[in-house]
Image (cartoon, rainbow, N blue to C red):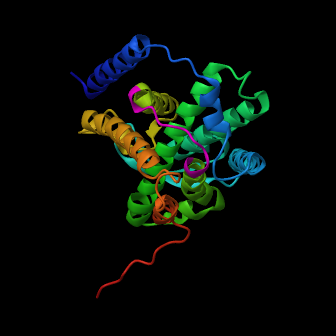
Amino acid sequence: MSGRMQIIGFLAAVVSFIGWRILTLPVRRHTVDDVLRLIKSNVVSDAALVAFRCACTAIIAFTLVSIAIDKTGINVCVCLVDQSFKRMRLVGRQRFYTFTVWAWIGQGMYFAAVLLLHVIGPNRSPPILAEAATVLFEIGLALAMLVSFIVTYVLIPGSPDPENFFTWQALAMHNLNVAFMVAELILNQVEFDVARHFHFALLYGVAYILFAWVIARHHGCYFYFFLNPNYKHALLAHIGLLVILTTFFCLAALASVALNPEQNALAIPVLLSFTAALCTFRPRHKLVTA
């Protein structure tokens, strides 16, 4: 069986599992209290919370528009279908093909959804909107942690030319992403529902994998070599990607419980230190040995 067929079989099994989970879980009706956890804070006033979320939404939107209209673009190394590599310039909408931008867009969707809850109010907000905002927050925090960790500790140290990671747009998507979501973790009162929602992290991963295949069909390249079905360990790489996504989802859930500012006096200092550890604002000079 070819590598692609093995991966298709694996993804089909994952999608079947996700479908089974969604269909068999009892329907949970969101109450007014659930909406209040999203739109109220025990740390700041309602006005300050709305102002923060409006600022986050504006920054995300401005960054995405800037990327879309940027005529200069960035040079990246891509993996061709035959597993060779080449440099490619990404301009405009092509910049939206990367996992990082997907995660940034997801954050924008979360802030838009929660601001809509503010506008509608707790008594009139549709349950599906509260559910969507909760899931988007959970996934947004997990992806922010994952993206910032990979960029700071894997991609930048391993890149011979990390210039692309230090444009202002990249700095926003690799640093403000985790800052925004950790701030949300401190400010809101959302309770992670791992049992009901972890499969959405899997669904996100499957969606991006399929998207990468569509891009490869049209452009003949993969932005991440391990998503190339011709890669020797492609099946293990795809399994690993979904496992990593689920792991970071669970880590985000653990952080939300263990580092609750209302119950743990050290929560905010620990979260701020954690955020600082995941952020990189300038290249680290590599040691040169004789």
- The x and y percentages for residue 124 are 74, 21
Q: In which quarter of the image is residue 168?
A: bottom right
Q: Quadrant of residue 158?
A: bottom left
Q: Is residue 236 left or right of residue 11?
A: left
- The x and y percentages for residue 233 are 24, 39
Is 194 magenta? The answer is: yes
Identify which residue is drawn at 25% across, 36% down.
Answer: 236
- The x and y percentages for residue 78 are 45, 47
In this view, 39 is above or below 174: above
Check the image and name the residue furthest to the bottom: 290
Q: 159 and 151: which one is in front?
A: 151
Quadrant containing the C terminus in the rendered view: bottom left
Is 140 magenta? The answer is: no
Identify which residue is drawn at 49% across, 59% down.
Answer: 271
Q: In this view, does 165 lie to the left or right of 231?
A: right
Identify which residue is drawn at 35% across, 42% down.
Answer: 247
Q: In this view, does 114 lie to the left or right of 241?
A: right
The segment highlighted magenta reads 185-195
Q: Quadrant of residue 188?
A: top right
- The x and y percentages for residue 44 are 69, 52
Across the whole image, how many numbered discs are drawn on residues?
0
